[in-house]
Amino acid sequence: MRVPRHVAIVMDGNGRWAAKRKLPRVAGHRAGLKPVRLVIQECSRRGVEVLTLFAFSTENWRRPAQEVGLLMKLFLEVLGREVDELAQQNISVGFIGDRAALAPELQECISSVESRTAGNTGLKLVIAVAYGGRWDAVQAVQQLARRCVSGELGVDAIDEALFAQALSLGGLPDPDLFIRTGGERRVSNFLLWNLAYSELWFSDVYWPDFDVGALDQAFEAFAARERRFGVTSRQIVGDVC
Ligand code: FPP
């Protein structure tokens, strides 16, 4: 079966999962850690190269301060607890998003997780925190504009490849498979440029209930899809992934 090189996931439905059980929303986020571990293990085992998880969006800052605070605490706790195991499993961890907006303690934790796992050659896990696709486009434009102003780069030298390189995912391949749980059929400002040709898979399952069967379904649907990238079916020879 053809396996996606890069899987990107919007882990939605934690709050509704908790509400259904009359639990506080953060209980849903905590319950969401189990499928996070599962998808990391499964993607690693199945030979996926990159897994990008949307943990906190630029828009999520507008949530009640208490929920934001508890989520940030959860990130710190989880990263501290899991880093050894991720390192042992040869997984490298990177973060994308507006780091300057995060508390200094979390910024330090992120940098230390990145450097601790930087030499690993297995699955590349990318965690999007304080990330938005529009923010990403703006920071890429700012980088390129600075280079133009300094005279290092000519405006006409800016092309798709240079723009893509300036985005947070830099040299990584674009996501082949985008998964969103929780029933909404939206991209919600995730990886706007990079998702141009991704296969989209939506699941009604709330994220804490996402299990290996649900992941299998997404991978099977991906394997069955014909990826044309703008050309016709007839032009596709062999396996274009
Ligand atoms: C969206 O569900 C989920 C989030 C904003 C947080 C997701 C974070 C985790 C699962 C923890 C992961 C931690 C690491 C370190 C990767 P929602 O709250 O929008 O759910 P709702 O739509 O039902 O309200």
Image (cartoon, rainbow, N blue to C red):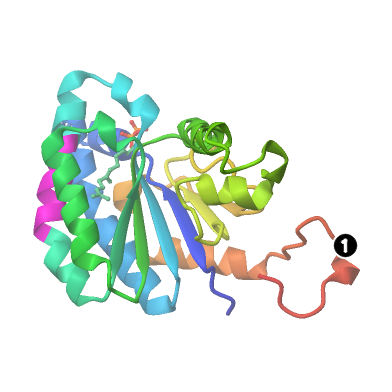
Position of residue 106 relative to residue 174, above or below, is above
Residue visible at 21% across and 61% down? 115
Disc 1: residue Cβ within 8 A of ligand 1's nearest atom: no
Magenta span includes 73: yes
Q: Pointer 1: what residue?
A: 232
Q: Give the magenta part as a residue range.
A: 72-81
Position of residue 20 relative to residue 41, above or below, is above
Q: Main secondary structure of the magenta part?
A: helix
In which of the image's four quarters is ligand 1 placed?
A: top left
Amino acid type indicated by mark 1 = Thr
- Decide which of 171, 91 is in the foreground and name it: 171
Give the quadrant of residue 174. Answer: bottom right
Magenta span includes 212: no
Q: Which image quadrant: the C terminus?
A: bottom right
Q: Is residue 129 left or right of residue 4?
A: left
Would you say residue 195 is visible in this rendering?
Answer: no
- Decide which of 225, 172 is in the foreground and name it: 172
Coordinates of residue 39 in the picture (x, y in percent): 34, 63
- Decide which of 116, 45 is in the foreground and name it: 116
Coordinates of residue 133 in the picture (x, y in percent): 50, 36
Coordinates of residue 173 in the picture (x, y in percent): 54, 62
Residue visible at 82% across and 72% down? 236
- Determine crowd level at label 1: few under 14, some 14-19, many 20+ residues with C-alpha closer than 10 A: few
